[in-house]
Image (cartoon, coloured by chain):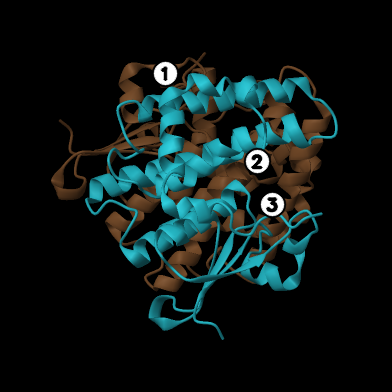
Chain colours: A brown, B cyan
Amino acid sequence: MSKKIQLYSLATPNGQKVSVALHELGLDFDTHVIDIRKGDQFTDEFKKINPNSKIPALVDPDGPGGKELALFESGAILLYLAEKTGKLLPADPAANWETVSWLMFQMGGVGPMFGQFGHFTKYAPEKVPYAINRYTTEAKRLLGVLEARLTGRQYIMGDDYTIADIATFPWVVCLSAFYNADEALGLADFKAVQAWVNRCMERPASKVSVFGAYNCWVIASCDAGGGAMCKEVALSAYDNADEALGLADFKAVQAWVDRCMERPASKAGMHVAPFPAS
Amino acid sequence: MSKKIQLYSLATPNGQKVSVALHELGLDFDTHVIDIRKGDQFTDEFKKINPNSKIPALVDPDGPGGKELALFESGAILLYLAEKTGKLLPADPAAKWETVSWLMFQMGGVGPMFGQFGHFTKYAPEKVPYAINRYTTEAKRLLGVLEARLTGRQYIMGDDYTIADIATFPWVVCLSAFYNADEALGLADFKAVQAWVNRCMERPANKAGMHVAPFPAS
């Protein structure tokens, strides 16, 4: 049996949290893609690992006492990885607990509410104005809380990058990249949040896990398998992402994407739990 | 300044989680009622303790290093109290992490989704059938996950009563007591869940713990 951590995931914000952390911590892992669009999460095999049938889930063959440990819920996984490695959580106990408060703020608020926002603005088969309004209002309120916290800080806990950031920034990226909500939420107005997202996304571990995952979704969809990102395909496969994100303005990013995609190592590194072609 | 723990709360399920835990642990505390129907959560004073303007929040004057510590989010508070006292979390590390998974299941799933169910079935000023259906379906699914877990177990972690139970049962009680959803969710069919709720509610600490920071009379 492999001695590497086994990750059961998909490149959704909750999945990205964990792959970002694993890359950040330099931990080796194998990825099992659980395609939730196809019901992979409901197999008996997967339910043994996560009885709630959600991703991400993780099995550490080298858990406490050298025994195999299964974990579900991204928040539990992040806490576990931080404790296992002694990283991504402040050593000072008071700061440690403050970080846990912000982690729970993401687990109980940001994730579920941004997710409802996404459901009613993007996925729901009918338009439900009351719900769109409710979750738009709450998403903006939550962004305001983040904005206040991040004003004058590099990261949620100040100078330290922690699991609170890792849990939260993929969801903020998702608002723009998946839900195309820049206008609906006035994302550009949350300047401290934007600066923080950029700061988090500049980290190499994030590029592979978050931006890389989106690119890899595009590439899996267009069957290009590792070539340079195809603009027309991105437009069609990704629903006007160019406009919503203003992708053309990020010239250094575009050049960098092409440069990264040419590297042999990217073929493996980019495909962390990609969405399988439908 | 009081050396007792200061609890800022209201008797909603999230508030009840913490007062249940405080009673279970035999910790002295003072209660500040934060009436969220009146906007108490938006004062500058409260926002210093919880910038997210939600209850519960807690200040421990005897925090790490003997210094005052402010905490928000019921899940964080429960973990903190368990670690501070060495109780309500299994000592075995593997069981401890399994408990944390179930705690997060409550924090990320049960609480938010039962809360949306309650909003659309009880509080929303208009009837929104799509949303009622969505959250009814998800509430039933979550109850099913709990039912499967609790079948053959006394508590979520087997024989041990932990913060996973404390985080979760007040929300199940709420479905019935606040949201009157026995019929809509077929609560009686979840027999292991019902037995577990009764088992939790029989604990002496809960008789007091569930009724801390009651809603002020309007």
| Chain designation of label 3 | A
- Which x, y percent locates residue A55? 44, 31
| Chain designation of label 2 | A
Q: Is residue A273 visible?
A: no
Type of amino acid at the residue the image marks with label 3 = Leu
Q: Residue at x 44, y 29 (%)?
A: B193
Kindly identify which residue carries mark 2.
A113
| Chain designation of label 1 | A
Kindly identify which residue carries mark 1.
A42
Closer to the camera in the image, A217 or B192: B192
Q: Is residue B146 left or right of residue A128?
A: left
Type of amino acid at the residue the image marks with label 1 = Phe
Q: Is residue B121 left or right of residue B137?
A: right
Task: Tell how many labels.
Answer: 3
Closer to the camera in the image, B216 or B92: B216
Type of amino acid at the residue the image marks with label 2 = Met
- Which x, y percent locates residue B121? 73, 29
Q: Is residue B64 above or below residue A200?
A: below
Q: Residue at x 79, y 47 (%)?
A: A186
Q: Residue at x 74, y 56 (%)?
A: B36
